[in-house]
Image (tube, rainbow, N blue to C red):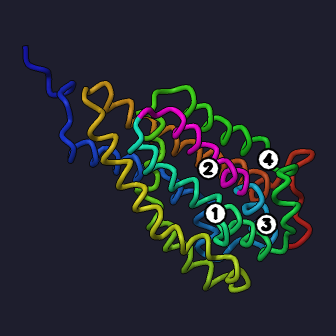
Amino acid sequence: MRQSAENALLTPEQLKKRLLAVGEDRYHHKHPFHLLMHKGELTRGQLQAWALNRYYYQSRIPVKDSIILSRSDDPAFRRAWRKRILDHDGTDGEPGGIEKWIKLAEATGLSAERVSSAHEVLPGVRYAVDAYLNLVSQRSLLEAVASSLTELFSRNLIALRISALREHYPWLAPGLTYFTARLTQAPDDAAFALDWVTKRAKTREQQELVINALQAKCDMLWAQLDAIYFSYVEPGWPPPGAFQPDVQ
């Protein structure tokens, strides 16, 4: 019996098209907080709040990738995937993404100790990031890898962000090395992950799992910015214990 068109296996190109559509609709490049950032309409305090809260996500990336690494029995996959951990943790003599993000936070005027402690992270940000760790540990390996495919969309956002930050917030220039590194790291990582999930999503059901995992990751990124926007832009109600900007 022939499969209906609705349930037919997608070709690799059709699957990629569906994934790119997720990014166009759901990636956080359209979030109001990012739009304000790129127009130069955020205060120094709001940028501090973003850098401090986003650090929690950055610090969990190598943890996330270690979970994914531990779930694979394929040495070739593990060799390829461990690059991501080194990119963020760094190597001897070469700072990684986490250290570079702290430099960005320091450029806003925060101390490294204050940021890395994560004591003042918003509950909404913490819950969203922890939900991502739950996704990669509890769902299938296929879904865990697929959730990383937000990197398909990140290069364009990063290029726009570098330009906007340099133009509107020149005092951030010493902290932009995180973004310049990701211009090459993210596309390479996305190409590997896309090829991997495309080859292993052998049924339409698995293909839908891949798409849904990417949607879930986009939702997590959006939820982080929702929490930051609510607390520091409109209406501007940071909860007790969260970061309180002392500069405008």
Left or right, 81 with respect to 89, comes to left
Q: Which residue is mark 4?
A: 122
Upstream in the sequence, badge 3 or badge 1?
Answer: 3
What span is colored magenta in the figure? 55-73
Q: Nearer the viewer, residue 169 or 119?
A: 119
Q: Which residue is mark 3?
A: 48
Q: Nearer the viewer, residue 39 or 148?
A: 148
Upstream in the sequence, badge 4 or badge 3?
Answer: 3
Q: Which residue is mark 2?
A: 61
Q: Which residue is mark 1?
A: 90
Spatial CA distance of label 3 from label 1 is 24 Å
Q: Secondary structure at mark 2?
A: helix
Q: Are marks 4 and 2 in contact (CB under 8 Å)?
A: no
Seen in the picture, residue 92 relative to 136 is either above or below; the reply is below
> What secondary structure is the magenta-colored segment mainly?
helix
Spatial CA distance of label 4 from label 1 is 26 Å
Q: Secondary structure at mark 1?
A: loop
Q: Are marks 2 and 1 in contact (CB under 8 Å)?
A: no
Q: Residue at x 67, y 72 (%)?
A: 93
Q: Residue 3 placed where, x, y %? A: 13, 20
Q: Are marks 4 and 3 in contact (CB under 8 Å)?
A: no
Left or right, 203 with respect to 142, comes to left
